[in-house]
Image (cartoon, rainbow, N blue to C red):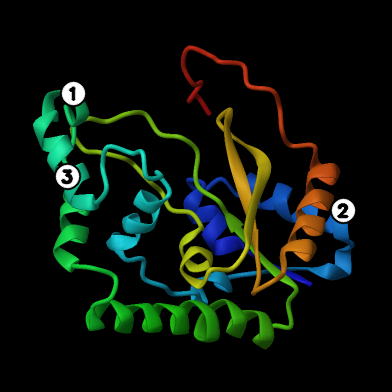
Amino acid sequence: MIAVDTSVLVDVLTGDERFVDTSAAGLAHALGEGDVVVCDAVVAELHAMLDADSTMESIATLGPQAPVKSLKDIIEFNEKNRDREMPYFGQDLFIKAQENGPLTTPAYLNALRKNHLMSRTQGIDLVLKQHRLDALIAPTGGPAWPTDLVNGDHFTGGYSTASAVAGYPHITVPAGYVLGLPVGLSFFAGAYSEPKLISIAFAFEQATKARRPPKFLPTADLSL
């Protein structure tokens, strides 16, 4: 059984309830009417914090030949090349992560334990168990927004943090369009649930056939 959180869907997708209807209908068609529960605020029970210093793991993937070896190196490189690297924004998150210190400090380890508790035992695992679910879904993110160099990004919300912090699998597939802009649907569950999630996501894809080839339009049609 899968839980569809309609409150999150409507909020993230600018109040367009047609996307909620399409997603729920696609799941019901793919999995059977009795296997889909449409409810409010199921995913809202998930709470997790994402530490800025998680960027350290990304640096390690650059390899030994990379000219930068640490977050400090990246910050210094950006400052030296500010006109080219940061013409419109700063690097506040990098600086904050650097100030937090290494990933071995007691403060970080305590935060990591708390994050795992909240995202696993008291988060995804708890929701799945309480509602006897196989998986959860939520919008991966809202439609793309115009670039705003004055006010910044207009991010309307979405899903990824709880699974990322927990270290649990999370798969996203094309789900539909809002004003012609593509949006995705996230399927997620507990540890080692990859085979089940892939099966569910594939069934949804085959039932909805939501993906359309990109048209590379010069601008979006925002008329309702």
Q: For the point 35% across and 50% down, which residue is it?
A: 59
Task: Name the side, left or right, on which 29 lies relative to 205.
Answer: right
The x and y percentages for residue 127 are: 61, 81
Q: Where is residue 115 in the image (x, y as percent from the top left)?
A: 40, 78
* 94 w.r.t. 53: above or below: above
Mark 2 = which residue? 29
Q: Residue lying furthest left in this view?
A: 80
**Mark 1 vs 2, N-terminal side:** 2
The tag earlier along the polypeptide, 3 or 1, is 3
User: For the point 39% across and 44% down, which residue is it?
Assistant: 62
Q: What kind of element bears circle 1?
A: helix
Task: Tell me the CA gap for discs 3 and 1.
Answer: 14 Å
State the separation of the CA atoms marked 2 and 3. Answer: 50 Å
Q: Could you say which quadrant of the image residue 63 lies in?
A: top left
Q: What is the x, y in percent for residue 81?
A: 14, 28
Q: Is mark 3 on a helix, strand or loop?
A: helix
Mark number, residue 84? 1
